[in-house]
Image: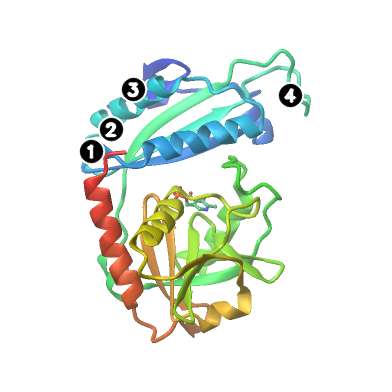
Amino acid sequence: MQAVYFNGRWIAPEEANISAFDRGFLFGDGVYEVIPAFNRRLFGAGAHLDRLTRSLDQIDIQDPLTRAQWMDVLVRLVSECGADDVSIYIQVTRGATAKRDHAYPNPPLPPTVLASASAIVPLSAEIFTKGAKAITVPDLRWGRCDIKSVNLLPNIMARQQAVAAGAVEAIMVREGIALEGAASNLFAVIDDELLTAPLGPHILGGVTRNRLVDMVKDQGQIPLLEVPIPFDRLFDATEVFMTSSTRDLLPITRINAHPVGTGKVGPIWTKLSKAFTKLKQQRET
Ligand SMILES: Cc1ncc(COP(=O)(O)O)c(C=O)c1O
């Protein structure tokens, strides 16, 4: 049985128990990260660890491991997982204290640290040939969506609504702006320009998003704008796709009851998806 990294030790998953007074359990006082490996090679680990450090920093939890220690943990998890394509989950909380108090304990507690790996279950091939459906939902989240907090209730409610509607993702709409998915970033082709929301407190700065933005800018073939996408303009899009570390570029060919463009996967998604796959094969981290 594959081991998990838990508070500095490698143990069997069933031995990884937290205190009932852990602040992650009581308050959702913690952050997480999801890091992929493809063909047993980590992809984007540096950027994911940067984001973890930033999330921790934003809520005043000291990063419990150095960069080199995190890398050792990630490499061991990939090699022990046994699958070619692996998703690594890291969670760090503010630790456990018997006294329930909203304010951060002073002095700080030792954080609770978990890292585990599982095989990435691929989406059906049909989704990438025919495209998938998304729905739009009101964004019920808080004002710091840039922090990868373990408080995911609005996200899981949105994703559940999507599943109930036969869709793969929910697009969050706040004050008339289509921002991102429940667990992915949003791109739309409108008037031959590729649009995605600018970084800021209302979206998570996706590692896939950022890498794709850099790739498109480097290529210089498709005009790319990091601007808010008005909800009603979403229905003028000729192509829409959503990005995340374990789903790459997911083509969306239907939003609510409306086909996107021709209702088929489009040429820009096809081109970028191929280029992104190539990038994944070339780059180690
Ligand atoms: C809200 C949200 N936006 C965007 C993303 C995509 O981020 P990444 O590309 O780093 O996986 C995620 C990933 O889980 C997410 O939860």
Name the residue rendered at 56%, 42% in the picture. Answer: 148
Name the residue rendered at 71%, 17% in the picture. Answer: 98
Circle 2 crowding by C-alpha within 10 Å: few under 14, some 14–19, many from 20 = many
Q: Amino acid at mark 1?
A: Arg
Circle 4 crowding by C-alpha within 10 Å: few under 14, some 14–19, many from 20 = some
**Decide: marks 2, 3 in contact (CB < 8 A)?**
no
Left or right side of 53 for 201: right
Q: Which residue is mark 4?
A: 104
Is residue 103 shown to the viewer in this render?
yes
Work out which residue is located at the far bottom of the displayed protein and give it: 262
Q: Is residue 17 above or below residue 145?
A: above
Q: Is residue 271 above or below residue 107?
A: below
Q: Which residue is mark 2?
A: 78
Q: Is residue 12 above or below residue 24?
A: above
Is residue 18 shown to the viewer in this render?
no
Q: Which mark is residue 40?
A: 1
Which secondary structure, mark 2?
helix
Q: Which residue is mark 3?
A: 72
Mark 4 Cβ inside 8 Å of ligand 1: no
Q: Nearer the viewer, residue 41 or 86?
A: 41
